[in-house]
Image (tube, rainbow, N blue to C red):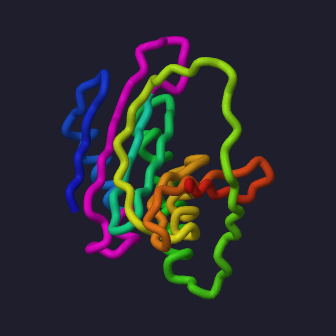
C-alpha cells in the first residue's frame, strides 16, 4: 500500500507523519491488504485565529473499485488524526458490510429527466478530475455514501452512458440519464 502524507500551510514533522501513517494504516488493514491501492493524507492548518478547530486532516483511500474519503478538524493535529481515523473506520466497516452481505436489498433508484437549475450566474471555484468507470446504480449509491457526497457521476454498466445519481430531500435517490 502506497501512503502519501502531505502538508498544506504547514510542515509535516516526522513524528506527525509516523502517527498519521500508523492510525490510517490500522484502518486500511480492516480491508484486505490487496484491496487498498493507495492512501493520501493531507494535513492542513488554518491561519485564521478565529477558527477554533484549525487543524484539518483529509484522508482519501483508493481501493479496488471504491474511493473512501473522510475529513475532520480539531484543536490539535493529533486529535484531528484520531477523529478522521474513527470516521474512516466507520466508512470501511460500512463498505465491508455492504460488500459481503449480499442478502440485503439494493437501494431503490428513481429515474429523473432533468435537475432543477439555478437563476444566478455561478462561478467555478474548484475543478476535479474523476475516473468514470462502468457500474450499476446500486454500486454508485454505495460509492456516493462512502464519499459523503450528495451526487455521483458514473458510467452506466448497462448503457455505457454517463449518469448522475443524487440524494433527494426525502432521503431517496434520483438518477439522471441523458438521451
Q: Seen in the image, is 128 located left or right of residue 107?
A: left
Q: Quadrant of the C terminus?
A: bottom right
Q: Position of residue 110 (x, y in %)?
A: 71, 63
Which residue lies at the image location 40% right of the left edge and 70% below the top edge? 30
Let me know if residue 93 appears in the view. Answer: no
Front position in the image: 178 or 8: 178
Q: Quadrant of residue 77?
A: top left
Q: Residue at x 25, y 37 (%)?
A: 6
In this rendering, position of residue 12 left or right of residue 52: left
Q: Residue 88: x, y in percent? A: 47, 55
Q: Relative to the observer, which residue lies in front, 132 or 90?
A: 132
Q: Can you say which quadrant of the picture contains the N terminus?
A: bottom left
156 to 174, vertically: above or below? below
Magenta residues? 27-54
Residue 33 pos. (x, y %) = 28, 73
Q: Position of residue 63 (x, y in %)?
A: 34, 64
Q: Residue at x 77, y 47 (%)?
A: 169
Residue ID at (45%, 39%): 80
Residue 119 belongs to magenta span: no
Amino acid at each position: 500500500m502506497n501512503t502519501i502524507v502531505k502538508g498544506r500551510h504547514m510542515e509535516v514533522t516526522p513524528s506527525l507523519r509516523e502517527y498519521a501513517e500508523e492510525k490510517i494504516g490500522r484502518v486500511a488493514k480492516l480491508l484486505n491488504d490487496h484491496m487498498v491501492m493507495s492512501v493520501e493524507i493531507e494535513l492542513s492548518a488554518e491561519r485564521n485565529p478565529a477558527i477554533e478547530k484549525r487543524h484539518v486532516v483529509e484522508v482519501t483511500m483508493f481501493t479496488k473499485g471504491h474511493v473512501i474519503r473522510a475529513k475532520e478538524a480539531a484543536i490539535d493535529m493529533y486529535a484531528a488524526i484520531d477523529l478522521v481515523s474513527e470516521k474512516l473506520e466507520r466508512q470501511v466497516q460500512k463498505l465491508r458490510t455492504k460488500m459481503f452481505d449480499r442478502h440485503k436489498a439494493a437501494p431503490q433508484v428513481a429515474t429523473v429527466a432533468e435537475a432543477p437549475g439555478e437563476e444566478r450566474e455561478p462561478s467555478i471555484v474548484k475543478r476535479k478530475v474523476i475516473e468514470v468507470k462502468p457500474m450499476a446504480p446500486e454500486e454508485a449509491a454505495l460509492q456516493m455514501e462512502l464519499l459523503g457526497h450528495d451526487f455521483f457521476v458514473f458510467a452506466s454498466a448497462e448503457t455505457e452512458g454517463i449518469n448522475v445519481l443524487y440524494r433527494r430531500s426525502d432521503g431517496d435517490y434520483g438518477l439522471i440519464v441523458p438521451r
